[in-house]
Image: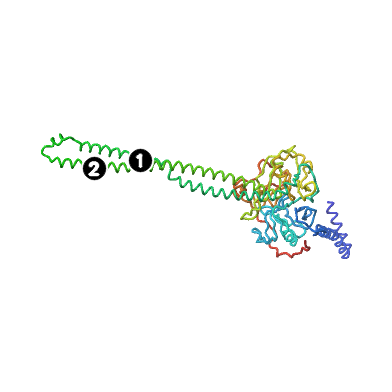
Amino acid sequence: MANRLMTAQSRVAMRSWGLPGLVMLAAMAALPALTVDAAAKQGRRAQVTEATAPREAGDPIMAIVSIKSQQVTIYDADGWIKRAPVSTGVKGRETPAGVFAVIEKDKDHHSTLYDDAWMPNMQRITWNGVALHGGPLPGYAASHGCVRMPYEVAENLFDKTWIGMRVIISPEDAAPVDFSHPALFVPNAQAVAAAPERARTLARESEEASRIAGEAKKASAAASREAAPFTAASLRKLEQAKTRADAELASADRVLAAAKAEQAKSDQARTDQAGTDPARIDKARTEKATRAEDAKQKAATKAADATTRFETARADSTSKLDAAAAAKDAAKAAETRKADTAKAATEAKLAIEPASVYISRATQKLYVRRNTHKPWPDGGEVFDFSIEVPVTIRDPDQPIGTHVFTAMARNDAGLRWSVVTIDNGDTARNALDRITIPQDVLDRIGPTVLPRSSIIVSDEPLSSETNYRTEFVAVLNNQPQGGFITRKPTVNNVPMASRDDDGFGFFAPGWGPQPGYSRRRGGQYGGQYGDPYGNQYGRQDFFPQAQQGSW
């Protein structure tokens, strides 16, 4: 009733105001809306503008994307060198927050999902399709999960980045802060200086061992072929032939003995043959004896030949089989030497590459990734994953956060480190205090650790997007991941690199989602889904290139 009364009173008042009053009332009503719209536009204009540090830029070490501020900041060893606006994923297709690295670059990429949409200077950070690339920036989140940058910034960044460069996507604003802690690797200056020459020396030794192993393998095959006729079966066959020949000789000898016995019969035998011609009888017995003698000679020759062949084969068999066995042992030893030198050469080569360490509270494991620079036919490069060990974390049931420690440059103490925190479970210092890194890992990595190396400590398990062609992919499960989850699944049980003669040529199934972890703090877990990176607006030429600035 009160509402109806107020409405009636309003109508009366409006009629009494007349047309000028109505116009004024409309203007007054529109004023708040105009003010809100102007404020929104002003807010968009004030969001982020491109900025370049007033100094000469060094090689980029990391890129940090702030979803909150819709900006990307590029850092070299001395600080930020470029800031620029970005557009991340819209609601339901959000860009996943987490830790990534560049795993592939494509100067002129076109989407296979979104109408051949142009995504220039694409830098992939997951194989399921999340990437940095040039694109239209309306001033707010607008992509299907990728990070769009101004076209010129994407182009300049593309020419400076490297496979494995760290990309951090933070839900809030984040920046690297200088940091020191006893748990951070400290290189040995002598070991670092000697590492390149050691890698070259071991590479030569590996090549020589490989050559020797190849020759030993050929020699073993040849010895086996020579020994092939002297198998136990073939020797039995020759022995049986000898036995038959000996039996034939014995039989011929008995026949000859009988013939000679007949020939030697006494004259009494001739008398017993009354009426016969003794000369004819003697001739017949002589011919019989002669035939028996010839048969014996042939049997003797055959038996002697069979005996010679058997004895020779038996002697050769021992020699050839011994030679084949020795050649096989030599080939086996050469292969072992080849594998050992290849492993040593690979470790030495990896020692002159930055190392990335990931420590997961979820899996209680420590993982190491180093780029082998071995290209993979389908794109990207193969990463070594040969170190994966349990790690001790104090209070494992308590959150530890997600902290990225990066060796920025050399200094008098060895290395200058920074830390970026994107998920506050515990402080960065407390996080390192709670972890005991195995000594063998310290021994393998510490002496030759280089700038651009990193240690990542996180509550999160590694995403199933981490495989043989990635560094580390870890997403924050307390943040929305729509643009990650809605992408087409990558192939399950993707192959993992495993050492062979050159270190990384054999691949076998083995990487999948990390078991035993179901932490959800308001986010969505879906590390196994993806598509070729998206752009919800379709082809770039639908939009004007409004971005300006250079870097």
Q: Nearer the viewer, residue 11 or 361?
A: 361
Amino acid on which disc 1 is placed:
Lys
Please report the residue visible at 86 percent of the width from the left and 64 percent of the height from the top. 23
Q: Nearer the viewer, residue 257 or 209?
A: 257
Q: Earlier in the sequence, mark 1 or mark 2?
A: 1
Residue 436: give x, y in percent of width and height: 73, 39
Check the image and tell me how it is coloured. rainbow
Callout 2: few (<14), some (14-19), or many (20+) C-alpha neighbours within 10 Å? some
Callout 1: few (<14), some (14-19), or many (20+) C-alpha neighbours within 10 Å? many
Residue 106: give x, y in percent of width and height: 67, 59
Please report the residue visible at 48 percent of the width from the left and 41 percent of the height from the top. 322
Q: Is residue 25 above or below residue 260?
A: below
Whether residue 53 sits left or right of residue 487 in the image: it is: right
If the image is split into quadrants, where does the C terminus sit?
bottom right
Residue 367: give x, y in percent of width and height: 68, 44
Q: Nearer the viewer, residue 343 or 321?
A: 321
Amino acid on which disc 2 is placed:
Thr
Residue 149: give x, y in percent of width and height: 74, 59
Query: Can residue 74 be seen from the camera position used here?
Result: yes
Residue topped by disc 2: 290
Q: Is residue 57 above or below residue 448?
A: below
Q: Is residue 545 above or below residue 341?
A: below
Q: Residue furthest left?
A: 275
Residue 242's mark? Answer: 1
Query: Can residue 82 be seen from the camera position used here?
Result: no
Whether residue 470 sits left or right of residue 330 in the image: it is: right
| Disc 1 to disc 2, C-alpha distance | 25 Å
For label 2, the SS is helix
Whether residue 29 sits left or right of residue 406 in the image: it is: right
